[in-house]
Image (cartoon, rainbow, N blue to C red):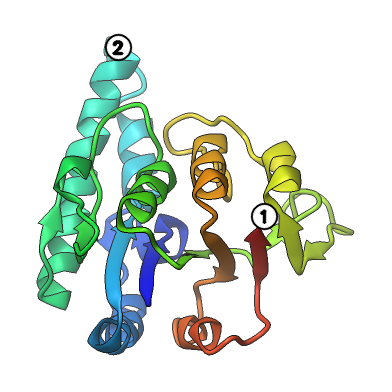
């Protein structure tokens, strides 16, 4: 099976860098996954890029310049994860071929890591895109703001497009519009789960009912 796993920065990267306890639990799962599957791992920025962004807010920097700085922070995350997994770090989507495995991030300003992950999934003809985030799936409303928000077990891409936001750096939502449209056009099944329990990734691979499943 060809699988892309996006590690959300919200669960994995704190304001000072990678969370040791979390990666200690996640890495064995990804190594197990990579033994029998073609695997691409995508890593986000999380608290590190957000805190850095707040620190440079008052400086006279253009948005493009700020995004360039965030890209370098993302590249550091890629090098960290690729070193732990013994996989190739990938900083250009042009490197992604149908048989490619590796760790992706820090691609280019102007796109979310989800969008880059979706493009990579399209290029390898992935069977599955799994996103690990800090919520239990896709909700009809923001669960952090609305107490009665309802988790959606299954969703069509057409409906997901209505929920997706265009977004800006450090604020792209569960999946931004570009990522959704790319995955939809490629017919790649997406599963969004709470990444706080890494072994749930294996449950997804085995067909377990967990998180939100999105498909055409």
- Please rate how many residues cluster around mark 1, counting C-alpha atoms within 10 Å: few if below 14, some from 14 to 19, many from 20: some
Instruction: Give the quadrant of the N terminus.
Output: bottom left
What residue is rendered at 53% in x and 89% in y? 206
Residue 82 point in image, percent of width and height: 15, 66
Residue 172 point in image, percent of width and height: 52, 39
Residue 216 marker: 1
Q: Is residue 43 above or below residue 60?
A: below
What residue is rendered at 32% in x and 84% in y? 33
Q: Could you tell whether 43 is left or right of 204 in the image?
A: left
Q: Are marks 1 and 2 in contact (CB under 8 Å)?
A: no
Residue 200 point in image, percent of width and height: 52, 84
What residue is rendered at 33% in x and 42% in y? 49
Residue 176 point in image, percent of width and height: 55, 40
Instruction: Give the mark nearest the N terminus, 1 or 2.
Output: 2
Q: CA distance from mark 1 to mark 2?
A: 39 Å
- Please rate how many residues cluster around mark 2, counting C-alpha atoms within 10 Å: few if below 14, some from 14 to 19, many from 20: few
Q: Which residue is mark 2?
A: 62
Task: Identify the residue at the far right of this view.
Answer: 148
Q: Looking at the image, how many numbered discs can be counted on the residues?
A: 2
Residue 15 marker: none
In this rendering, the label closer to the viewer, 1 or 2: 1
Asked whether 67 or 101 is in front, the reply is 101
What residue is rendered at 50% in x and 36% in y? 178
Q: Could you tell whether 20 is left or right of 14 in the image?
A: left
Q: Is residue 15 above or below residue 1?
A: above
């Amino acid at each position: 099976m060809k699988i892309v796993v996006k590690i959300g920065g919200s669960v994995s990267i704190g304001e000072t860098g990678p969370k040791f306890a979390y990666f200690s639990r996640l890495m064995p799962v990804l190594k197990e996954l990579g033994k029998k599957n073609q695997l691409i791992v995508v890593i986000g920025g999380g608290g590190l890029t957000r805190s850095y962004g707040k620190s440079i807010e008052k400086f006279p920097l253009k948005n493009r310049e700020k995004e360039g700085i965030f890209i370098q922070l993302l590249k550091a995350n890629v090098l960290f994860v690729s070193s732990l997994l013994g996989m190739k770090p990938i900083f250009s989507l042009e490197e992604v071929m149908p048989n490619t495995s590796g760790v992706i991030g820090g691609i280019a300003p102007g796109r979310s890591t989800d969008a880059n992950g979706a493009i990579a999934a399209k290029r390898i003809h992935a069977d599955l895109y799994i996103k690990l985030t800090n919520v239990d799936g896709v909700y009809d409303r923001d669960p952090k703001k609305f107490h009665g928000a309802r988790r959606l077990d299954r969703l069509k891409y057409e409906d997901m497009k209505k929920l997706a936001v265009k977004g800006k750096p450090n604020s792209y939502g569960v999946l931004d519009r570009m990522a959704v449209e790319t995955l939809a056009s490629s017919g790649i099944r997406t599963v969004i789960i709470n990444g706080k329990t890494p072994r749930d990734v294996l449950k997804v691979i085995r067909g377990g009912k967990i998180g939100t499943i999105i498909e055409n």
